[in-house]
Image: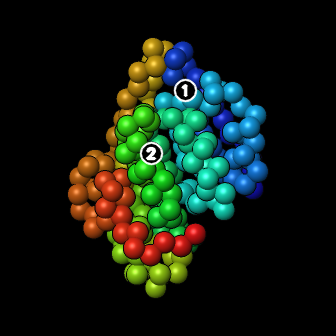
């Protein structure tokens, strides 16, 4: 796996793209990078929503980044079980922490965790949904040097999640059975 990341800045705006960073790469980012090198308005969550064995390091890294929004680039019908409920749980805890800036996290496509209960996901193995369904869709960020930004919408995220049984971004995910 790749242990690289990209930090793009435009004046006072920053986006941190975490690619497929995991394992030792997560720990190295925390240990080596200065806080100002990690701080970002937007973070692209690594590895399409997989949860690393060292989830505490991912938590520490996301706390250091302290983004306003987290984007999960994931396919509805992926065969890896992404986005895993543990990652949604982590993002919800950061969103609910009033000392953090995270206001929202979005997936590009609907995931099985937002459609099926924990017991249904177990019977599915790691398979994804039968067909692709946009959630937030393609995410385009328009940033200004002042640090303000806005997200252009491909899909009406709020309309999509209103149709889902367990929309994770609204804290409705079924975590009754968690597997790490």
- Label at residue 14: 1
Total numbered badges shown on the rendered structure: 2
Residue 156 percent across, percent down from the top left: 28, 47
Q: Nearer the viewer, residue 8 or 171?
A: 171
Residue 48, by quadrant, is bottom right
Quarter of the image for the N terminus: give it. Answer: bottom right
Question: Please, is residue 124 above or below residue 101 in the view?
Answer: below
Residue 8 as seen in the image, left or right of residue 99: right
Question: Please, is residue 114 above or below residue 66 in the view?
Answer: below
Residue 137 percent across, percent down from the top left: 40, 49
Mark 1 Cα shell of 10 Å, populated few (<14), some (14-19), many (≥20):
many
Sequence-wise, which precedes: disc 2 or disc 1? 1
Q: CA distance from mark 2 to mark 1?
A: 19 Å
Asked if one can make out residue 27 in the rendered structure from this viewpoint, the answer is yes
Residue 57 as seen in the image, left or right of residue 25: left
Circle 1 SS class = strand
Q: Residue at x 33, y 56 (%)?
A: 171
Q: Residue at x 28, y 56 (%)?
A: 160
Q: Nearer the viewer, residue 48 or 37?
A: 37
Q: Residue at x 36, y 69 (%)?
A: 174
Are the residues flagged by discs 2 and 1 in contact, CB closer than 8 Å?
no
Q: Nearer the viewer, residue 154 or 91?
A: 91
Q: Residue at x 42, y 64 (%)?
A: 111
Residue behind mark 2: 94
Residue 123 percent across, percent down from the top left: 46, 85
């Amino acid at each position: 796996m790749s242990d690289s990341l990209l930090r793009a800045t435009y004046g006072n705006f920053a986006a941190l793209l975490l690619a497929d960073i995991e394992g030792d790469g997560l720990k190295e980012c925390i240990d080596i990078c200065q806080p100002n090198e990690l701080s970002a308005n937007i973070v692209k969550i690594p590895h399409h929503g997989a949860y690393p064995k060292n989830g505490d390091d991912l938590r520490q890294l996301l706390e250091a980044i302290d983004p306003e929004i987290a984007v999960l680039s994931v396919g509805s019908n992926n065969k890896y079980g992404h986005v895993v409920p543990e990652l949604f749980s982590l993002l919800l805890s950061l969103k609910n922490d009033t000392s953090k800036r995270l206001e929202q996290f979005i997936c590009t496509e609907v995931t099985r965790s937002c459609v099926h209960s924990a017991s249904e996901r177990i019977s599915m193995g790691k398979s994804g949904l039968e067909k692709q369904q946009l959630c937030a869709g393609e995410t385009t960020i328009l940033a200004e040097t002042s640090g303000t930004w806005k997200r252009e919408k491909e899909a009406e995220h709020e309309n999509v999640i209103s149709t889902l049984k367990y929309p994770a971004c609204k804290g409705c995910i079924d975590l009754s059975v968690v597997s790490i």
